[in-house]
Image (spheres, rainbow, N blue to C red):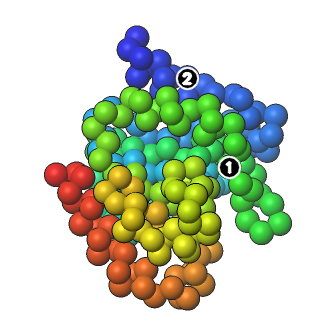
Amino acid sequence: MSSFSQLTNDLKNCRICEPHLPLGPRPVFQLTPSASVLIVGHAPGKKVHETGIPFDDASGKRLREWLGISTELFYDASCIAILPMGLCYPGTGKSGDLPPRPECATTWHQAVLSQLPDLKLKVLLGAYAQAAYCSKEHKTLTERVAAWESYLPECIPLPHPSPRNNIWLKNNPWFVKDVLPTLKKQIDIALS
């Protein structure tokens, strides 16, 4: 078994957070070594936990629109890798889903990145992904997204595409005007 096959097998069978997961473990990710774009999000929501398909929800629909790519291309693992900060649904808290379990990122992210030699762009969705991958110079999600140009060409920080962020999008119209056109260009470059 190749080291990549072993890694994906280990990811599928991960149980390190099992005692903390209300619906049990069901790691959700999409990986192949040839992927040139990596999408790093929070953790699967309940619907994604049920289907086992990453971004198979309203967030995914919006994300595909932001990226300017078809559903078919989005789910082409040879092009697009998807690795959340937490691989499994963490459960629900007072105001939405709980944060991703921290064990996942520290256990798996570096190992996965080492197996993606063709990676050209990381799309960092939301505060948890950005805290792990972005400069500590920018303290908030809004600061990081506003400084998006400083992270190119390696990565681009975005708000999470969840409908819960509609107020953020309304309060930050520059995101759609300034960031999304460049995001689409960067995706085209990375996939070409």
Quarter of the image for the N terminus: give it: top left
Residue 156 rendering spot, x and y as whole percentages? 40, 61
How far is mark 2 from mark 1, CA to CA?
Answer: 19 Å
Residue 88, relative to residue 164: is it above or below? above
103 or 133: nearer the eye?
Answer: 133
Q: In the image, 161: left or right of 90?
A: left
Residue 32: mark: none
Could you tell me which secondary element the residue under label 1 belongs to? loop
Q: Residue at x 68, y 49 (%)?
A: 100
Q: Residues within 10 Å of mark 2 (few under 14, many from 20)?
A: few
Residue 139 rendering spot, x and y as whole percentages? 62, 66
Residue 103, relative to residue 56: is it above or below? above
Residue 10: mark: 2
Residue 100: mark: 1
Q: Residue at x 56, y 32 (%)?
A: 108
Q: Residue at x 27, y 38 (%)?
A: 118
Could you tell me which secondary element the residue under label 2 belongs to? helix
> Mark 2: which amino acid?
Asp
Among the 4 quarters of the image, the one containing residue 114: top left
